[in-house]
Image: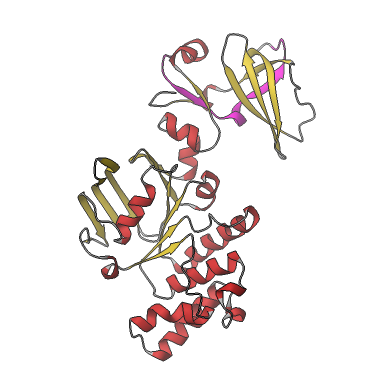
Amino acid sequence: MSTAAAISLRSVSKHFGDVVAVADVSLDINDGEFLTLLGPSGSGKTTVLRMIAGFELPSSGEILLNGSDVSNEPAFKRDVNTVFQDYALFPHMTVAENVVYGMRVRKVDKTERTQRRDEALRMVRLTQLAERMPAQLSGGQRQRVALARAIVNRPKVLLLDEPLGALDLKLREEMQTELKALQRTLNITFVYVTHDQGEALSMSDRIAVFNGGRLEQVGSPRDLYERPATAFVAGFVGVANLFDETTSQRLFGRSAVHTLRPERVRVLRAGSSEGHAARVVDSQYLGAEIRLTCRLEAGGNVVASVPSAQARIASRDEQVALAWDSSAVFEVSGSR
């Protein structure tokens, strides 16, 4: 992956009337990077993607593609392709015809069209289905057709707007693996929009977290999970214990908002020489782990994740002690 910026957003904002959808966002996306725009509905992530694509123009700021200002350029003049959640396939065309459609519009030579089509179908493992109609395909197969149609144009940037949102969990997980492998093979920039934290963590080189139209934090999946910068990121990316100033002062001796991941909490026998006295108030079996919600004797709840295979797991209403290493606790900005 190159360190040069394939996409640069410089103080980009977007207003719809009095509504501020995106507020002063600056972000560099590296050439060959898999970057995910992550956030809840209404956070501004999809609007950012649409501005990169040219479907929306910024109210202020600049958008650069490979160093050229395209802020006011229409979508068809930008060297990007977009894959949508609803696939947007032509129902009256075969798989092969859908894939070559864009090249026919661009008047690409027939021999080259055929070569590119076959290469794209091979990459997404659909060669044997080239003559089928979209209605004869599964959801995962239709999504792969949409990918083939996008990559056949050899764009410098591929934009993906929640492309796996309509698929069931198992197929979604399979497609996550396929997408990341495809991106590595093509070595082009992927900008991926999702509200699914697990999806973002599993595929991305970096993640940009949005909230209320603003960029909260940008970093690697590990950075965001293990060292969240804000209370929002800590709570949105995975499960986290968030402690307000009063509780933090009591537990850590510092009056600020702090975060602690459940898997970093040790559940010990009551009366242990270390830890804080607590009572288990809820227990959730989640397969590989059991999530315990514990009420501290000093006040406040702490969630702990315990491996299901652990020999002894505390039960509901049992008295326990909770402990953690100081290195597992991070101060974050924002309110709990």
The x, y position of residue 331, in whole percent, is 43, 24
At 74% from the left edge and 35% from the top edge, which residue is drawn? 308
Tell me where residue 231 sits by quadrant: top left
At 59% from the left edge and 80% from the top edge, which residue is drawn? 132
65 displayed left or right of 33: left
The x, y position of residue 73, in whole percent, is 22, 64
Residue 178 seen in this snapshot: yes
Q: Is residue 17 above or below residue 170?
A: above
> In the orientation shown, which residue stands out farthest toward the right?
311
Colour pattern? secondary structure
At 62% from the left edge and 67% from the top edge, which residue is drawn? 138
The x, y position of residue 46, in whole percent, is 38, 51
For the residue pair 97 and 118, the one nearer the viewer reads as 97
Q: Is residue 252 above or below residue 76?
A: above
The x, y position of residue 294, in whole percent, is 65, 19
Instruction: Work out which quarter of the rendered image holds the N terminus and state it.
Output: bottom left
Residue 5 seen in this snapshot: no
**Does the magenta run of residues contain 209?**
no
Q: Is residue 223 above or below residue 112?
A: above
Magenta stretch bounds:
253-272
Instruction: Work out which quarter of the rendered image holds the C terminus and state it.
Output: top left
Tell me where residue 323 sits by quadrant: top right
